[in-house]
């Protein structure tokens, strides 16, 4: 069976078929496009047809191939982690800009990624900083299976990140180097932020881990819990913290209002994604204890 005949045998979009064939025969997609006459063996053909059927049933391409590109890097993904989205790259860009401004006056920065999943956020940041000696990288997740994926990606990209198991910020709040830290912490979080209804109404995401997508309280339960954890932490810590949260565009006002209740003097700024929708909230918490 030739590649051309296999491509014609399925109603899937061409790009999906080409990528799945390329995955099975261990060639780039360009090879599949350029060599339609190439013959595929029986075993490879049967594997391709199985992947076609799974993709038709809604299983995402990234899970079938085990790969997803994010911020110019290739990440291993499986059913235990959320598939990295292009809109999350905005969060990485904002952190990189922030770190550049801080390095002018700080010798050390701690970067903490909460709910790290595949590890794509801290790994992408670490790979794009020339002098990583200025930063310590820590990432947490409540799922041990997700942490296994993140550790695999960190090793693949040769990045030195400490991974901690636990609920949101709690694992960090117990570490002595964090408790007594007095400089800048940059904290990123792409936590579950969609509602149960949004999840049920969108078939395209229903093969991804629900616990990585859905949160109670109109999608804001985990962000509110994280803010409360930080509020308690800062009662006995002198660090300044800058937070970057990825959100649903409908949550801007509600979440901003809650942030102001927890941290009345904080600075809040919202950034839009490429579609012009609110996507990332920046929260700058200046700790008054630093001046005491």
Image: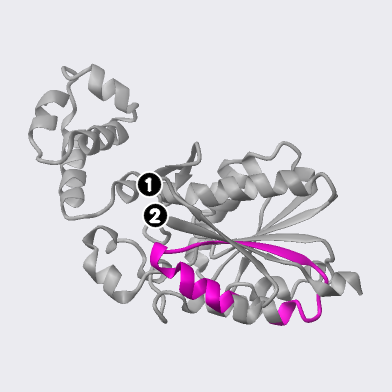
Q: Position of residue 41 (x, y in %)?
A: 18, 28
In this image, 132 relative to 7: left or right? right
Q: Earlier in the sequence, mark 2 or mark 1?
A: 1
Q: Position of residue 81 (x, y in %)?
A: 43, 59
Tell me, for residue 78, which label it has, or none: 2
**Which range of residues does the magenta coloring cover?**
232-259
Which of the image's four quarters has the C terminus? bottom right
Q: Which residue: 34% across, 47% down?
A: 62
Residue 54 position (above or below residue 191) = above
Residue 85, can we see it? yes
In the picture of the structure, the residue carrying the numbered disc 1 is 66
Residue 42 position (above or below residue 56) = above
In this image, 215 relative to 141: left or right? left
Disc 1 residue crowd, few under 14, some 14–19, many 20+, Cα 10 Å: some
In this image, 230 relative to 17: left or right? right
Disc 2/disc 1 C-alpha distance (Å): 6 Å
Disc 2 residue crowd, few under 14, some 14–19, many 20+, Cα 10 Å: many
In this image, 149 relative to 16: left or right? right
Is the residue under label 1 in contact with that under label 2 (CB below 8 Å)?
A: yes
Front residue of 4/103: it is 103
Front residue of 77/230: it is 230
The colouring scheme, among rainbow, by chain, secondary structure or one colour, is one colour
Q: Which residue: 22% across, 68% down?
A: 201
Q: Which residue: 20% across, 36% down?
A: 17
- Name the quadrant containing residue 245: bottom right
Residue 95 position (above or below residue 116) = above
Q: Position of residue 77 (x, y in %)?
A: 42, 51
């Amino acid at each position: 069976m030739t590649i051309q005949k296999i491509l014609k045998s399925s109603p899937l979009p061409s790009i999906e078929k080409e990528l799945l064939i390329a995955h099975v025969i261990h060639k780039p997609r360009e090879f599949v496009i350029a060599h339609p006459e190439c013959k595929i063996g029986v075993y490879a053909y049967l594997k391709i047809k199985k992947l076609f059927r799974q993709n038709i049933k809604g299983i995402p391409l990234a899970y079938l191939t085990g790969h997803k590109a994010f911020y110019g890097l290739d990440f291993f993904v499986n059913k235990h982690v959320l598939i990295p989205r292009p809109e999350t790259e905005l969060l990485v860009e904002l952190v990189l800009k922030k770190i550049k401004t801080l390095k002018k006056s700080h010798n050390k920065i701690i970067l903490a990624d909460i709910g790290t999943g595949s590890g794509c956020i801290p790994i992408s940041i670490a790979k794009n900083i020339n002098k990583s000696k200025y930063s310590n990288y820590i990432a947490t997740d409540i799922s041990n299976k997700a942490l296994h994926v993140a550790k695999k990606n960190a090793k693949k990209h040769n990045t030195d990140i400490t991974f901690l198991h636990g609920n949101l910020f709690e694992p960090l709040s117990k570490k002595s180097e964090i408790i007594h830290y007095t400089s800048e912490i940059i904290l990123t979080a792409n936590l579950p932020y969609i509602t149960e209804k949004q999840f049920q109404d969108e078939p395209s995401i229903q093969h991804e881990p629900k616990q990585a997508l859905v949160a109670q309280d109109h999608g804001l339960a985990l962000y509110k819990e994280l803010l409360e954890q930080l509020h308690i932490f800062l009662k006995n810590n002198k660090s300044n913290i800058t937070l970057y949260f990825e959100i649903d565009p409908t949550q801007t006002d509600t979440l901003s209002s809650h942030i102001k209740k927890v941290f009345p003097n904080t600075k809040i700024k919202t950034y839009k994604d490429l579609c012009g929708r609110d996507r990332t909230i920046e929260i700058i918490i200046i700790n008054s204890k630093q001046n005491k």
